[in-house]
Every structure is written in C-alpha cells, then in structure tokens.
Image: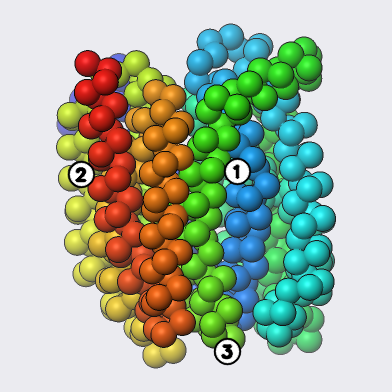
Amino acid sequence: MIKSLQKLLKANPRAKQVVGLFSVNIIGIPVGIVTSIVIIRYLGAQGYGDYRFIQSIFSIAILIFSFGFFQAGNRALVLNTDRQKAKEYYGAELIITGGIFMVMSVSLILYALFDHNIKEKQLNVFLLFLIPFGWVFLLQRYFEVLFQADNQIKKLSQVRLYPTLGFLFTAALVYFIFMDSQINKLVVIWTFYIATQIVVYLFVIIKLEVSFKNIRTRLNEIWNYNKSYGFNVYLGSLFGIGFANLTELLISYFGINNSGVGLYSLALTFTLPLSLIPNTIATTHYKDFSEAKSVPRKVFLLTAGLSFAALIGIWLLVGPFVKIFYGHEFENVIVLNFIMSFGVIAHGFADFFNRYLGANGQGKALRNSAFLVGVSILVFSLVFIPKFGEYGAAYTKLISGFVYLGIIIFYYIRFLKRAN
C-alpha cells in the first residue's frame, strides 16, 4: 500500500503538493497550540489577550494599506509562464511592499498616539516599539498571496512551517529563562517572535532570486492588473476579512481588559483545521482551477470528507485538552469553540469556491461577496459583542460563515451558467 501511494504521488505532482502542504499545515496546528500553551503560561490570560490584540492591529493595517497590489501580483503570476518574468514580478512586488510599509507605519504611529482604547490598555508605547518591524507582517502577506499563484508550494510550506517551529523553540527558551525576569514579558515574547520571522523570511527571499530588471514595465503591468482585478478583490477583502479581524478589536473596546480577546482567539485557533483543509486543497489546485470548467467533483468530495472528519475530531478532543493544559480559567474556550466550529467549516467551504472564482479572474464577484459578508459581520458584531463579549463574537462567526457560503455559491453557479 505504501509503495502504491508513493507511485501515485510520483505520478501526480498536484497530489504530492496537496500532501506536502497539508502535512505542513497539520504539523503547524499542534505546534501552534503548544506555543500558545507556553505563551499563556508565561503571559497569563490578560497578557495573551494583549499579545493577540497587537496581532489584530497589524492584520487590519495590512488589509487596509495593501490596496490590492498583492492580489494584482497574484493575477500576474497566474497568467505568467516565463520563469525570469516571474522573478521580475517578485522584485516589483517587493518594491511595492516597501511603499506600503511606509504608508502603514505613519498611520499606525498616529493610531498609537491618539487612540483612547490602546492608551487605556497601556499598549500605545509598545505598539510604537513594534511599528519599525511591521514589514515582517507585510512579507507574510507577500509570500502567502504570490506563492500560491506561482505554484511555489514548497516555499509556501517553508514560510508557514519554519517560523512556527522557530517561535515554539524560542518561546520555550523564554519561558524557562525569563519566567522570573523583571523585563516586560510582552516585549520579550514579541522580540523573539519578530526575530524568528526575520531569519526565515530573509532566507526565502534570497532563495527566491528576485529580479529588478525591467522594473518599470513590471510595475506598470501590476498597476494595470490592480485596476482590473486586484483593487476589486481588495475592496471585498477590506469588508470581508477586515471586519472579521475587527472582531477582536471590538472585544477589546467593549471589555475592561483584553482577556476576552485571548479566549476568543484561542477558541478560534482550535477551529483552524476546518479552514486549513479546504484552503490547502484549493491552494494546490489554484493554477488548475483557472483551466477547469467547474470545481472537479473528486477534489470537492475529498475536501468535504476531510473537513467533516476534522469537525468530529475537534468536538471530541478540545474539551479534555483545554481542561488538562489550560486550566479552569480557559474553560469558556470549549463552548466558544463549539459555537464557532459550524461557522468556520461553512467559511472554509466558501473559501474553497472563492479560490476557483479567483483563479478565473472573477474579481468583482469576490469583491461583492466579501462586501456583503463584511457588512453582516459588522452588523452582528455591533449587535452581539457589546452585550455578550467574546460569546457575541462567536455568534457572529457562526452566522457570517453561512452568509459567506450562501453568497459565494450564488456567484459560483452564476459564473458556470455564463461560462457554459
């Protein structure tokens, strides 16, 4: 059986990529969970909430200030077949990333200086300390969006796995060495987090052999792709993903401290396999989707089977795991996880069909669907979070997941009718 599987993987490069990337994602889940255990024991519930709150700020900033240029580079690479030209696109996108970083940094400085909530939580000085390293978060986005379009699955696996493993190792060192230190614990954790990302990302950039030849031509091409495709997807992401990331900020704004942010984000972490499975399979088939008349039936059935198996596994394992490793202080995570798991699996299937539409250049459909989902997230967040806190955020996740799935299926069916 093992020999047959080896022959199958050798004969089918896409199957090999699916297994490889999926394995990396699966390995990343327990590594991430163990890392969260170490960080929580080091920082405590409120400190972990502060840690996640800062991450949310950078996530939203990247969405706001990318202006669709990463998605434009994605489109350019999907349609490209010339290896040298691909390297030039990477170089042009790197220059664009530098420009985005400067604009984003100025805006975050103003936010840190004038926002009432971040001052009240006493995190404004710490945010100012992190802003010069914001380019690290932009490179995360750079790799994720461009590598899937260029079918650089091996490199995508590296930028997902190596920083996670490196941060687990350094977090463990921090826990044993700095546990009783008087140094600001949040500063220590973030310093090691940023350092591990920088080491891996610079290594990948060097291996990528980016080129700055014909830079003006490539920048003009990306600009045109941004007008026809990237900016449409950006507007959709701004409403869809942006408002989803805004959830953790709203928990903070309506809470006395950031402990609710930590509980919600930890519960969301345990649902990660439900989104990773369809994401991984769709990512490895992204280039193939651009040539397919519809989503291949076998690919969809594989996605569905793995996703529902993961859902049952999560329901069985999360409760005992939280009680053993996190303690009584985090028992609310169990209920939060159960509520959100339904919404996350619906969101995962929607992302699966979203990738097909994206591979076929349906930028306006993605923009419209994300806009509608974003509005629903914002409305339900403002209704539920002020009254129910992190539980309100969980209900929002549940409802918005099914809203997203319904809308994206509508656009998928409409595209198939028009294409055929």
> Would you place residue 198 above or below residue 204 in this image?
below
User: Is residue 131 visible in this depiction of the protein?
Assistant: yes
**Residue 141, percent across and down?**
60, 43
| Callout 2 amino acid | Ala
Instruction: Compute the Cα span from label 1 to label 2.
Output: 27 Å
Instruction: Compute the Cα span from label 3 to label 1.
Output: 32 Å
| Callout 1 amino acid | Arg
Residue, disc 2: 304
Q: Earlier in the sequence, mark 3 or mark 1?
A: 1
Cβ–Cβ below 8 Å for labels 3 and 1? no
**3 vs 1, front mark:** 3
What residue sits 44% from the left and 55% below the top? 374
User: Is residue 200 visible in this depiction of the protein?
Assistant: no
Mark 1 element type = helix
Residue, disc 3: 256
**2 vs 3, front mark:** 3
What residue sits 54% from the left and 43% below the top? 235
| Callout 3 amino acid | Ile
Residue, disc 1: 141
Instruction: Compute the Cα span from label 2 to label 3.
Output: 40 Å
What residue sits 39% from the left and 77% below the top? 384
Q: Residue furthest top?
A: 82
Q: Residues within 10 Å of mark 1 (few under 14, many from 20)?
A: some
**Residue 165, percent across and down?**
56, 54
Mark 2 element type = helix
Q: Nearer the viewer, residue 411 or 179?
A: 411
**Residue 180, percent across and down?**
71, 87
Q: Earlier in the sequence, mark 2 or mark 3?
A: 3
